[in-house]
Image: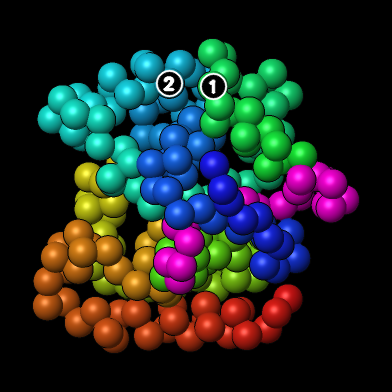
Amino acid sequence: MEYKLEEIRKGVFLFTTENRYDLCMLFLRYAEFYESPNPEFKGKLFSIIDFMEWYSKEYGNGAFTYPNDWSGFNIPGKTLKEIMSWGGFPEKNKYDLLMGEVLDKILETGCGWDFYLISGITGQEKTKEHELAHAFWFLDKKYQTEMSSLVTQTSSNAFEKMQDRLKEDGYCDEVIYDEIQAYLATGLSDGLKKKLGRFGIKKLREPFIKVFQHKLSSKE
């Protein structure tokens, strides 16, 4: 697989490739270990076949639609360290070997495991910004506090609508605040737009965009 790996901010590494299927299959087990809504997979070293079977029944009406459903991923370095400390996933495939190569390249920079890995399809800037918002949330406590406060200040109606949609899309409870801030800061999915309807999306997004753009321009 041809790919590009670059450190776009201090401690934030961006992985991009042109092939969506390869991207999703590379990050699947690592992302689901981090934030799967299914406790059988979250925090567990699971078989990819078991996951594919469950996902197909839960979201694909019998078909494995994961590579069509997702286009970007974000994972803390410490989560990847935990996976590797247990020997990695069972039944390693070519994607697990590639992830090992990617991690070796990151660790060669001397950052240790205090990094954040984000990914997307080559040229998809909106996906890049969305995943970068997750990196800011995890790495910058001031940013997280500001964004968390803004999420708390949204009306209960808007919050519940977004929370319901995110759960329908396969997000676990622990990342709801993080996902809401990332979507409001960088652009809503079609599903969230439909869920919010004519709720006043522009006004709702304005404070989130302001905080994100300030962080983006700070270069810190």
- Verify whether residue 122 appears in magenta: yes
* Amino acid at circle 1: Asn
Farthest residue in the front direction?
A: 2
Front position in the image: 34 or 57: 57
Please give the name of the residue rendered at 38% of the width and 41% of the height, measured from the top-left corner: 21
| Residue at the spot of label 1 | 93
- In the visual, does 92 lie left or right of 61? right
The secondary element bearing badge 2 is classed as: helix
- Verify whether residue 24 appears in magenta: no
| Residue at the spot of label 2 | 48
Q: Position of residue 45 (x, y in %)?
A: 54, 19
* Amino acid at circle 2: Ile
- Image quadrant holding the N terminus, namely top right
Front position in the image: 192 or 98: 98
Q: Position of residue 24 (x, y in %)?
A: 42, 41
Residue 51 vertical placement versus 214 (above, below): above
Q: Position of residue 127 (x, y in %)?
A: 43, 64
- In the visual, does 188 lie left or right of 42? left
Circle 1/circle 2 CB separation < 8 Å: yes
Q: Which residues are magenta?
A: 105-125
